[in-house]
Image (cartoon, rainbow, N blue to C red):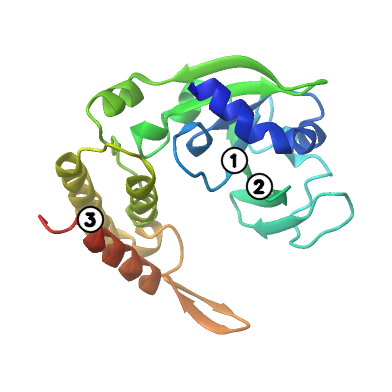
Amino acid sequence: MDRIELFLDRVGPVVPFLQFISKGKPFYVAGGVFLEGDFGDIDVWGVTPPTTEPGIHIFDAPCILRHPGYTGCQYKCEVVTDNAVTYKVNDVKVQVCLQPVTDLKSLLETFDFAICQIGAKVSVPDKLEIEEFYATMHRYTAVKHRRLGYRGTNSPGISLLRAVKYIKRIPDLDLNTVRNEVLQIVIDLINKGVEDPEKAFGGPLWSETNEGRLSFVPELIHCLVKLQKIKILTAL
C-alpha cells in the first residue's frame, strides 16, 4: 500500500467530520498519518490566506468551540490547548491545529523529524479530494538512510517523546544512526533547558490541577527508560 492509499484508508472514517469543520474549503493533513505502523492521530491545519490576519483561518469557525465535552454539535471536543483542539471521531483522534499556515512546503519544514515531512492539501466538497501531495527532500534522505532525520527544535523535550514513538513504530531504522540523533536531542534539551526550561520542555515543568500538581519530569524519565529498554541509550 503506497502513502496515498494508506492515507485514504486511515482518513476514511473521519471524512464527514473533516467536511463539517472545513465547510468544503481546502486544508492540510500531514505527518504521522502517512507513516507505516500504528498511528496516534490525524493532524490537520486550516489554510490561511496571505491577506488574512495572523491566526484567523477556516478552523476558527463557530463549529470549533474550544471546550472539552462540548456537545452543541455531533462531534465532541476532548482536549484543548493553545495550539490545537482534539476530537475523537469513530475511535480516531483528529487534532485540529490552530497555528496559521499558508503553504504545505513551509508547514512540513517546521517539523522536527524529516521522516514526518510528508503531507497533502485536501478538500471535501462532496468527497475527499487530494489537491496537492508533497514530501521534502529531507524526508527522502531520512528514508534512504533509515533514520528519523532530526532537524532541531525549540522544544527538544517534546521531540524526545516523539522519538520514542517513531522508533517503536517505524521498521528497519538504523539504530546506530538513531542513537546519534537521540544524543543530539538530549544535548539540545540540556542546552536549551539552561536558557529556558519551559520552552525546552514544551511547556510548564508542572501544572496545578484538581488532582494536585502534575509534573512533566516523570514523563520524560519514563521516556528515557523506554529508550534504554529498546537499546537506544546503551551507546550514549
x%, y% of residue 219? 39, 69
Q: What SS does tag 1 mark? A: strand
Residue at 49% over, 44% down? 38
Image quarter of residue 109: top left
Pointer 2: what residue?
Answer: 92
Residues under numbered marks 1 and 2 in contact, where contact means CB atoms less than 8 Å apart: yes
Tell me the residue at 66%/51% (across/down). Answer: 86
Task: Please say if 225 is above or below 1.
Answer: below
Q: Are marks 3 and 1 in contact (CB under 8 Å)?
A: no
Which badge, 2 or 3, is on the more N-terminal residue? 2
Q: Which mark is residue 42?
A: 1
| Residue type at tag 3 | Val
Please indicate whether residue 41 sits to the left or right of residue 160 in the image: right
Mark 3: secondary structure: helix
Q: Nearer the viewer, mark 3 or mark 1?
A: 1
- Viewer-closest of 54 and 178: 178
Q: Earlier in the sequence, mark 1 or mark 2?
A: 1
Q: Amino acid at mark 1?
A: Ile
Task: Tell me if residue 145 can be seen.
Answer: yes
- Quadrant where the image shows the C terminus: bottom left
The residues tagged by marks 2 and 3 sit, at their Cα atoms, a distance apart of 32 Å
Where residue 149 appears, as percent x and y from the top left, is 28, 35
Q: Nearer the viewer, mark 1 or mark 2?
A: 2
Figure quadrant of residue 148: top left
Give the vertical position of 181 relative to 228 (above or below).
above
Answer yes or no: is residue 103 visible. Answer: no
Q: What's the CA distance linking mark 1 and mark 2?
A: 8 Å
Please give left or right for residue 233 compared with residue 29 in the image. left
Q: Quadrant of residue 13?
A: top right
Furthest toward the front, the residue is: 1
Taking the view exactly as shown, the residue that stands out farthest to the top is 131
Name the residue carrying label 3: 186
